Image (cartoon, rainbow, N blue to C red):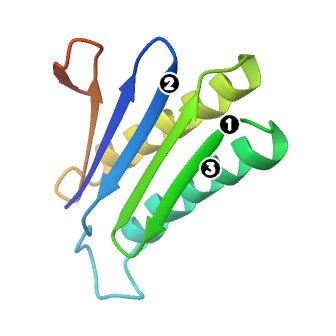
Amino acid sequence: MIKITFSINADEISVNAEGHALFDAEGKDVVCASVSTLLQSWYFSEKELCQASVEAEMKKGFFKSKMRKHGEKEDLLFQSLVLNLAILEKQFPDHIKVNLEEKDGRQQHW
């Protein structure tokens, strides 16, 4: 299962994803490929199109990113990421879980 946690506070947004969907064999897993594509597209769009202050660590089965909060364009790209991952979660509930960690540390299922 891929577990994705969004943490949002006053100054920063962080995205942590880890695990494997195990929907299909490696190289054929459309859920893993979709999640990877969405995460990497979000990161590179924030960095290149918005010149956002964003950093990321990416490796097989792991993605971790932090971004300082900015303006409307950055927020819209982030909302798009959350929306699309939530749609994937609804389509593949046994393979992906999306959670929002609020300022006080509570976790909420998206």
Q: Residue at x 40, y 85 (%)?
A: 28
- Classify 10 Å Cα crowding around label 2: few (below 14), some (14-19), many (20 and above): some
Of the residues shown, which amino acid type is indicated by label 3?
Answer: Tyr
Q: Position of residue 61 (x, y in %)?
A: 33, 70
- Residue at 16% of width from left, 56% of height from top? 94
Q: Quadrant of residue 24?
A: bottom left
Between 84 and 78, which is closer to the camera in this rendering? 78
Amino acid found under the numbered disc labelled 2? Glu
Query: Image quadrant for the N terminus?
Result: bottom left
**Rendered image quadrant of residue 54:** top right
Q: Secondary structure at mark 1?
A: loop
Above or below 22: residue 5: above
Q: Amino acid at mark 1?
A: Ser
Q: Nearer the viewer, mark 3 or mark 1?
A: 1
Residue at the spot of label 2: 12
Number of the label disc, if any, that sits on residue 53: 1
Give the quarter of the figure containing the C terminus. top left
The answer to which of marks 3 and 1 sits earlier in the sequence is: 3
- Relative to 31, 106 lies left or right: left
- Cα distance between the residues tagged 3 and 1: 10 Å
